[in-house]
Image (cartoon, grey):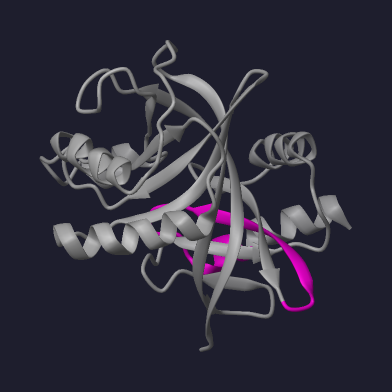
Amino acid sequence: MTVRELIGKITLQENVNPLGENKIPNTFVIHVPNPLATYYTRFSEINRPNSILFLTKKSVSFESILRATKRINELMDLELHAAKCEMDIGSRKYYGIRIKGIHRYSHIKNIQEAYKNEGFDFAKNVRINEETEALVRVNKFFNLKQVTDRIYQSPQNKDRFYVIIPKRLTWDEFRDTTFKIKNNISITNFDIAKGILYENDGITDMLRIIKPNITLEMVKEIEQKYLEELL
């Protein structure tokens, strides 16, 4: 099976939580919970951060994030995975660095200080409620193992699939289509986001699907439902 590495973007809607501690004082830091946390963490006594967003004063380049992360990983003997991100809460837009691979909440402040030492300026704290609805966009690398002509699987996570779709969806179109499908399909408790992949011949639109113990047959059923709506 072919494995491809591509750059792309994922857009997802999540209920996010502000951090009040374990951060540089008066900075804006967000935790994006794992949408499947109940399943994935019930076998572990350790409550680990899922995705941490360090919000910055202005938009920063993906290149600067990758270079800084490589140096931080080497200096601190870490395996952080960083990406460029944007977050919309209502009409407000924020920019920042999305970090995965932090093993303890108590480690967040030291890692944030390492990025500060790399020259990143963090946004001042913004008061938001717990479980605030936000639209998060993340630019990242994808490792994709081809399963069918239109379906890919993550080599690192067997429960994560990507499905190529034939057209671009606005966020409203994706939200409305997903609501309709989730109310007319036998498969339950799957998390889905929309995304794009940057390829030599242009942009490819796709869906990211996550479900514990998901099978290829389930993915094909979800794929078929979306194709019926889009074609």
Which image quarter holds the C terminus? bottom right
| Residue that appears at 64% across and 40% down | 182
**Number of numbered discs visible in the structure rendering:** 0
Q: Is residue 202 visible?
A: yes
Position of 119 compared to 4: left or right?
left
Position of 122 compared to 220: left or right?
left
Q: Quadrant of residue 149?
A: bottom right
Q: Position of residue 153 (x, y in %)?
A: 50, 70
Q: Residue farthest to the left?
A: 45
Residue 70, above or below 109: below
| Residue that appears at 32% across and 17% down | 26
Position of 105 compared to 225: left or right?
left
Q: Is residue 79 visible?
A: no
Position of 24 compared to 142: left or right?
left
Residue 101, above or below 56: below
Q: Position of residue 207 (x, y in %)?
A: 64, 56
Q: Which of the pair 24/135 is nearer the observer?
A: 24
The range drawn in magenta is 200-220
Residue 23, above or below 198: above
Q: Which of the pair 27/227 is nearer the observer?
A: 27
Residue 202 among magenta residues: yes
| Residue that appears at 46% across and 34% down | 56
Q: Which of the pair 80/151 is nearer the observer?
A: 80
